[in-house]
Image: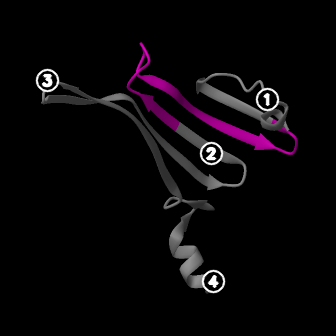
Amino acid sequence: MSAESAESDSIDGFRWRNLELRGRLLVQGWTDREDGESASDVEAENARLELRWRPARWLHGVVEYDQAEDRHLKDAFLAFRGGRFEVRAGQFKPPISPLQME
């Protein structure tokens, strides 16, 4: 990548195009046969969408929507990282895994 194209992708050192969309869908279905007749049904048990944004090494943001939770907005935060420390601001579940805490 040339220096000119790198500059056109960034404003003030941020890469505004660096977005990642993730999702998952849990579907449950059943079929029943009785007396030669069959009945079936399919329903979505859970749907989750997650949008991640990382414009710089020291800054990232996450917005996560979960259809099955009582509150549909699961996570929405910005995180600032400096060295081994990270500061998060917003709505999120604190990490409890030692791997996430590194």
- In the rendered structure, which amino acid carries the disc numbered 3? Asp
- In the rendered structure, which amino acid carries the disc numbered 2? His
- Quadrant where the N terminus lies? bottom right
**CA gap, disc 3 to disc 1?**
52 Å
Model colouring: one colour
Find residue 21 and name its label: none
Toward the bottom, the furthest residue is 2
Q: Depth-wise, is mark 3 or mark 2 nearer the camera?
A: 3
Residues shaded magenta: 63-85
Q: Classify mark 3: residues with Cα within 10 Å, few (<14), some (14-19) or many (20+).
A: few
**CA gap, disc 4 to disc 2?**
24 Å
Q: Earlier in the sequence, mark 4 or mark 2?
A: 4
- In the rendered structure, which amino acid carries the disc numbered 4? Ala
In the image, taking residue 18 as reference, residue 95 lies left or right, namely: right
User: Does the residue at mark 4 contact the one at mark 2 (Cβ under 8 Å)?
Assistant: no
Residue 2 location, quadrant: bottom right
Find residue 35 and name its label: 3
Q: Classify mark 4: residues with Cα within 10 Å, few (<14), some (14-19) or many (20+).
A: few
Residue under the image location 51 percent in, 59 percent down: 16
Where residue 86 appears, as percent x and y from the top left, is 77, 35
- In the rendered structure, which amino acid carries the disc numbered 1? Ser
Residue under the image location 73 percent in, 27 percent down: 95
Find residue 97 and name its label: 1
Q: Which residue is mark 2?
A: 60
Disc 4 is placed on an element classified as helix
Q: Which residue is mark 4?
A: 3
Residue under the image location 12 percent in, 30 percent down: 36
